[in-house]
Amino acid sequence: MLKEKLILIPEEESGCKKYDFTSVQSIQPTYGFSNTFGEEYTELSILAIKMIIERYGNSAEYLQIFKYNGIEFWVINDENTMVTLLLPSEY
């Protein structure tokens, strides 16, 4: 169980192509993400995807922004089947 609350920042309406997070088959955390969040990184990864699906269904912007324990991280949908979780400094 996570020690802090995970926050999904609402996306801005950009008119960009929407992506389907419900068909994700692979979750790829970067070294910085996994190193920063330690033993919580797996649970954070799964919960982040679930939160995106709960809020946006199968139509979300490719970039989703989260905050956990005061640290911002990004979830990027790479053409629907894979997502990358990273810190903004790793982009």
Image (cartoon, rainbow, N blue to C red):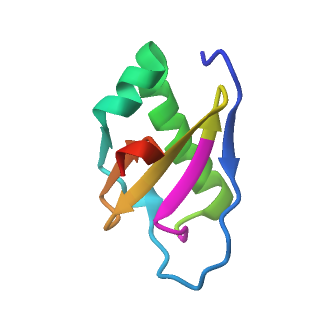
Q: Is residue 4 above or below residue 51?
A: above
* Whole-percent x, y for residue 73 in the image: 52, 42
* Whole-percent x, y for residue 16 in the image: 51, 82
Q: Give the side of residue 85 with respect to residue 31, left or right.
A: right
Q: Residue at x 44, y 23 (%)?
A: 36
Choose between 12 and 55: the one closer to the eye: 12
Tell me the quadrant of the picture where the N terminus can be found.
top right
Q: Is residue 50 above or below residue 63?
A: above
Residue 9 counted in the magenta span: no
Residue 65 counted in the magenta span: yes
Q: Is residue 10 above or below residue 72?
A: below
In the image as oriented, which residue stretches furthest toward the bottom?
15
Choose between 75 and 72: the one closer to the eye: 72
Q: Find residue 81 and report its image quarter.
A: bottom left
Q: Find residue 10 and report its image quarter.
A: bottom right
Choose between 11 and 45: the one closer to the eye: 11
Give, as a single range, the part of the protein colored magenta: 59-66
Choose between 44 and 68: the one closer to the eye: 68
* Whole-percent x, y for residue 64 in the image: 54, 56
Q: How many marks?
A: 0
